Amino acid sequence: MALTTIIAGCDLSVPSDHALERAIAIAERHRAKIVLVHAQADEATGGATDNALIAQLGEVSAAVRAEEAVRLANKLAEIQARGLVAAVISRIGPADEVLAAAARDEHADLIVVGTHGHTGVARFLLGSVATGIVRVAPCDVLIVRGAPTRAVFGKPLVATDFSPAADRALERAGDVVVPGAPVEVVHAWQLPAGSWGATLLGQARFPWSTVRDAVLRSAQVQADKLTAAHPGVHVALIQGPPAQVITEAAERGGHDLIVVGAHGKRGVRRLLLGSVAETTVGHAPCSVLVVHGAAPA
């Protein structure tokens, strides 16, 4: 589908600048509007504070805000010079909440953000902007990693569990990749919970391999249906935990984008962490597009 409005998170950092390069390329492909969204820190002081200190902090804050305004204006002018419609929104508040609110106000199709987190390493500190925006966004979210490139993606890897959410992810992948780019699809299959215990009974009493074969046959049937509906798409069936299978496949294949569907409710902060989408965002070796399901009726 054609994108009309793209939100680009802009905290004026290097990862943010890299994300903006991708956002510009995607906007140019769709002739979409770009809205630069900058979340200002709430610098209110609490408790008993020396008046002189408050005054000094106020001066520093004013100088920082002025510098931020100049740099945002320069980025806006650069984008407009390329013939794109662009705007700036600057609000006080947590970055993920500011971005989500701006996306709702602007009826955005996509939010693009950079990430300061490391790749390929389990991160113990949750709550980064990338993780937070995946939870609360009212639309799809692109988390950009890698070197700065003003281009759409060329080698996507789409994760599927053959659900409607995964089907939507496959469809939306085309919004941010080169037209005609080969699309690889990966499905992580696992044995049913408890089937490991069959090995304790022995092959003679319980041929657990029949369970494995049945699971694989079922996955292959679904994969055949998907390839029939999307000619040219190749589906790899790999055993293992989904997030691990997805990230390792992306690394092996040298993919520059992972596309994954999110099953969770959007627009609300979820208490249960560790979904496939969130785990993939935290561990991916490349950029990740998290595709949300259709809005509830």
Image (spheres, helix red, strand yellow):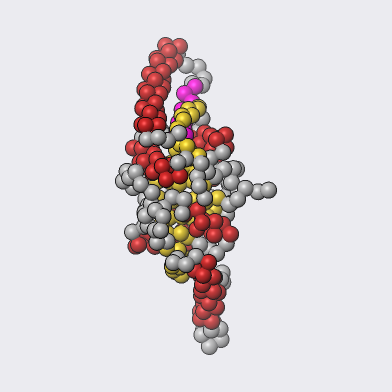
- Report the residue at 33% width, 59% height from top: 254
Query: In the displayed structure, would residue 180 be above or below residue 144?
Result: below
Q: Residue furthest left?
A: 147
Name the spot of residue 211 as percent of width and height, x first.
55, 78
- Report the residue at 46% width, 59% height from top: 158
Q: Residue furthest top?
A: 52
Overall secondary structure of the magenta stretch? strand
- Report the residue at 51% width, 56% height from top: 171
Q: Is residue 221 magenta?
A: no
Name the spot of residue 129 as percent of width and height, x first.
46, 40
- Report the residue at 54% width, 56% height from top: 168
Q: Residue furthest bottom?
A: 204
Name the spot of residue 126 as percent of width and height, x first.
47, 44
Q: With 27 as the anchor, is 193 left or right in this view?
A: right
Image quadrant in which you'd find residue 21: top left
Q: Is residue 1 in view from this perspective?
A: yes
Query: In the displayed structure, would residue 57 be above or below residue 120?
Result: above
Residues 114 and 178: in front is 178
Residue range highlighted in magenta: 35-44
Name the spot of residue 102 as percent of width and height, x first.
53, 34
